[in-house]
Image: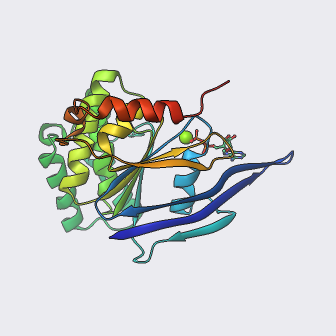
Amino acid sequence: MKILEVDKLKKIYHTPKEEILALNDISFYLNEKEIVSIIGPSGCGKSTILSCLTGLLDKSNGEIINKNNLKFGYMLQNDALFPWLNILDNCLLGLKIQNKLTVENKEYVINLLQKYGLKDFIYSYPQNLSGGMRQRVALIRTLATKPDILLFDEPFSALDYQSRLSVSDDVFNIIHNEGKSAIIVTHDIAEALSMSDRIIVLSKRPSTIKSIYEVKMTDMSTPINNRKCKEFSTYYDIIWKEIDKDE
Ligand code: ADP
Ligand code: MG
């Protein structure tokens, strides 16, 4: 079932010197409980799409159809945890700001921390956790306000390769266990392929959609295992050839 439709989205940035056409005619949809990745060269407009979805930026033209008024949760590039707050307080911050810190919501967050391997770290501080664990905390903080659609902007780019692999497994499992839908922005083809149901490939700016791939590989399970599927390298090569490179 389609839960979100983007129709001919256009975004022009106005600067004192010029108008920059960032997005031109971007159309795609997201189904319930699906993970869709948006991939494209740096500066093509990936983050701009997410900002238009959340309303952080005004679109210049086109439609964003969110019939059931589903809530977005936005997870940024770095984990942005406050070093002076313990893990629990970091996770509760959004609820506090929104005046929704009920006993029930607090229990929900503690339960998530326990469920996803952070039971012994609830009162620890971010600097005492590994990069991968901090990323899990950041996701739980995003989940605290119970969003329906999670938006990730290059979520693992600050992590080393090994951590990226295990965190993408963690994040994938959390998204599925919690019954969420997600849009992941990345410039990493393997990451997109291993995690998504569909991949949207953008051209360089002004960004249009070059193609959309349904990822259908034999024996798909979790991201780390999906990298071993026999069709993985074929998809990888096709998408690699398609992505605009710097001349
Ligand atoms: P990506 O996330 O794919 O790297 P962005 O969405 O951040 O790309 O940016 C797309 C393009 O829009 C970039 O080329 C950038 O120059 C331009 N851009 C982004 N933000 C602004 C802004 N606030 N004012 C003017 N131009 C901007
Ligand atoms: Mg970006």
Q: Is residue 70 left or right of residue 217?
A: right
Q: Which residue is at the front of the view, 205 or 133?
A: 205
On the image, the x and y values in percent for residue 153 come to 46, 44
On the image, the x and y values in percent for residue 17 come to 87, 45
Q: Which residue is at the front of the view, 230 or 54?
A: 230
Q: Residue at x 19, y 60 (%)?
A: 108
The quadrant the C terminus occupies is top right
Q: Residue at x 30, y 38 (%)?
A: 194
Residue lying furthest right in this view? 17
For the question of whether residue 86 can be seen, the reply is no
Residue 183 vs 67, above or below: the answer is: above
On the image, the x and y values in percent for residue 55 come to 56, 63
Quarter assignment of residue 132: top left
Q: Which quarter of the frame holds ligand 1? A: top right
For the question of whether residue 115 can be seen, the reply is yes
The quadrant the N terminus occupies is bottom left
Q: Residue at x 22, y 53 (%)?
A: 176
Quarter assignment of residue 170: top left
Q: Which residue is at the front of the view, 161 or 212?
A: 212
Q: Is residue 60 left or right of residue 195?
A: right
Q: Which residue is at the front of the view, 47 or 145?
A: 47
On the image, the x and y values in percent for residue 78 come to 43, 36
Q: Residue at x 37, y 60 (%)?
A: 149
